[in-house]
Amino acid sequence: MKLYFLRHAEALDGEDDAARPLSPDGREQSKAIAKFLSDAGVKFGAAFTSPLVRAHQTAEIVLRTMGLMGELKLKIADALLNETSESQWNRWLKSLPEEKHVLLVGHAPSIAERVRALLSVAHSDALNLPKGAVACVETDDRHSGRLKYFVTSKSLGL
C-alpha cells in the first residue's frame, strides 16, 4: 500500500481557522500536485481529508484534476487533525481499506510527524512538509515504511 501524505495547499488568513479557504496560489499548488500524481500513474482507491476547509478544498481539487471525483468518494477523517493522538492515529491507520494508493490530506505539524514515524525518523527537522507538498510512503504493515518520493510545490516550479 502507498500512502500519499499531502499537506493542504496555501490558504487565506482568517479569524476562523477551520473555515480558511485556499488562496489562488493554493489552488494552483493543488492542481500542480494533481498533475504530477497523474503523470506518475497514480490512481487513488481511497481518499481522506481533515474536515478543515483548506484541506478539504485541496483534496477536492486534486481528485477533480485527476478525474477521480465521480468514481471516488472523499471521506472526512478527524484522524487527520493535529489534535489526534498517536494511539488514535495508529488505530485509524489500521482501519483504512486495503487499497494500492490512498490519499491523506492534513496539516502541519502532524502530517509530517506521521510520515517521520512510519520512516523511523526521530529528528523533527529531518523531514517537514511545506504547504502543498506530498510524501509517498510505501508500507506493508502500516507501522513502518519506505519513502518512495517527496515533492513540493516549489520543486514543481511554483
Image: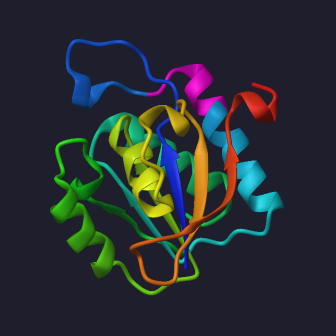
Is 103 above or below relative to 105? below
Q: Which residue lies most toward the front here?
A: 122
Q: Position of residue 36 (x, y in %)?
A: 77, 51
Q: Which colouring convention does the figure follow?
A: rainbow
Is 88 above or below relative to 150? below
In the visual, does 38 lie left or right of 61? right
Is 158 above or below relative to 41? above
Camera sees residue 128: no
**Residue at x 49% of width, y 31% of height:** 125
In the visual, does 89 lie left or right of 32? left
Residue stretch rendered in magenta on the structure = 22-28
**Residue at x 42% of width, y 70% of height:** 73
Report the predominant secondary structure element of the magenta stretch: helix
Q: Quadrant of the C terminus?
A: top right
Q: Position of residue 15 (x, y in %)?
A: 21, 12
Q: Quadrant of the N terminus?
A: bottom right
Residue placed most toward the observer, 148 or 49: 148
Residue placed most toward the observer, 83 or 20: 83
